[in-house]
Amino acid sequence: MKNVTVIKLGGATFGKGDTTIADIAALQQRGESLVVVHGGGSAVTAWLKKQGVETRFVHGERVTDLPALEVATAVLAGLANKEIAAAINVSGGRAVGISGADGALIEARQKAKDMGYVGETVRLNTALLTTLLGAGFVPVVAPISLYAVGRPDKAPALINANGDPVAGDIAAAMKATRLIFLTDVAGILDESGKPIAELSAGEAEKLIKSGVIKGGMIPKVNAALRALEAGAVARIIDGRRRHALLAEFDGGDGGTTIHK
Ligand code: ADP
Ligand code: MG
């Protein structure tokens, strides 16, 4: 598979007037091989509330018990995934929505005992992605994974994962040429709030240690570092800008590039 681009859609950028879906359809028509990965933490939170499922947070991450896993699966691998795939399909693209459990794409294990059903990737099986790309589809991947490693007998076969590491893992496994994170800031910001145009892996690690990179940006940078190791270029761009994705393929200005 040549020249694959992995695109991570941020929860915050997917909304009214968003041009990302139209851009994905247009890029596919130009012959680009795209894999889309999405999150949807805020939608999961809203649906947990609607269902009256209480959850707690540890170190900023949601503890996922069985009821929360069921809602996360319904929302991420169901509603969010189908909305994105359908939106691409009505915009002239050809998309198929899958989860990490389909085709055993993402084999995961429990990340930490006290986090419940929160998974981390152990192994990827990219056959389904190559099949879909080869047949001319954009795979749209929800980060619900297959609980395949270290699973107690009675535990579910599904496990919830963060979309950022999943995007990095897929980029690495597919030997993608680039990994693009669409998010709700102008790029990685320095301590004075100015976007940083270019960062080496070492500089990015320092900014995490010093606390300049924090919260939701940390998993993106860590995922970017993993993809870099496999030869991709990682970009973190402002998904709120109109046609940010098209601009990215036409040279790209703004945002942050992370390289080796
Ligand atoms: P997404 O839905 O795209 O995953 P997140 O909220 O998880 O969005 O991650 C993006 C957020 O990371 C930004 O909105 C910002 O609040 C936070 N962040 C932390 N440190 C930085 C930094 N140094 N530069 C830019 N954003 C940062
Ligand atoms: Mg996030």
Image (cartoon, rainbow, N blue to C red):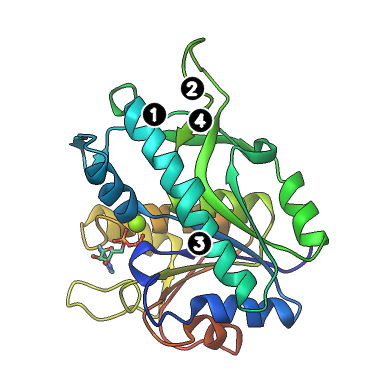
Q: Disc 1 or 2, which lies upstream in sequence?
A: 1
Do the residues bearing badges 2 and 4 touch, measured as CB atoms within 8 Å?
yes
Q: CA distance from mark 3 to mark 4?
A: 21 Å
Q: Kindly tell me whether residue 121 is visible in this rendering.
A: yes
Q: Disc 2 or 3, which lies upstream in sequence?
A: 3
Q: Quadrant of residue 233?
A: bottom right
Residue at image coords 33%, 54%: 43
Q: CA distance from mark 1 to mark 4?
A: 8 Å
- Circle 2 sits on which residue? 156
Do the residues bearing badges 1 and 2 touch, measured as CB atoms within 8 Å?
yes
Give the left or right position of residue 201, taking residue 233 as reference: left
Do the residues bearing badges 1 and 4 touch, measured as CB atoms within 8 Å?
yes
In the image, what residue type sits under mark 1? Tyr
Q: Which mark's residue is nearer the viewer, 3 or 1?
A: 3
Q: Position of residue 209 (x, y in %)?
A: 26, 53
In the image, what residue type sits under mark 3? Glu
Give the residue furthest to the right. Answer: 135
Which quarter of the figure is the N terminus placed in? bottom right
- Residue 117 got which mark? 1
Q: Kindly tell me whether residue 161 is visible in this rendering.
A: no
Residue at image coords 37%, 72%: 15
Q: Is mark 2 within 8 Å of ligand 2?
A: no
In the image, what residue type sits under mark 4? Leu
Q: Which mark's residue is nearer the viewer, 3 or 4?
A: 3
Give the left or right position of residue 19, taking residue 115 as reference: right
SS state under label 4: strand
- Circle 3 sits on which residue? 83
Q: CA distance from mark 2 to mark 4?
A: 5 Å
Q: Position of residue 22 (x, y in %)?
A: 56, 81
Q: Disc 3 or 1, which lies upstream in sequence?
A: 3
Do the residues bearing badges 2 and 3 touch, measured as CB atoms within 8 Å?
no
SS state under label 2: loop
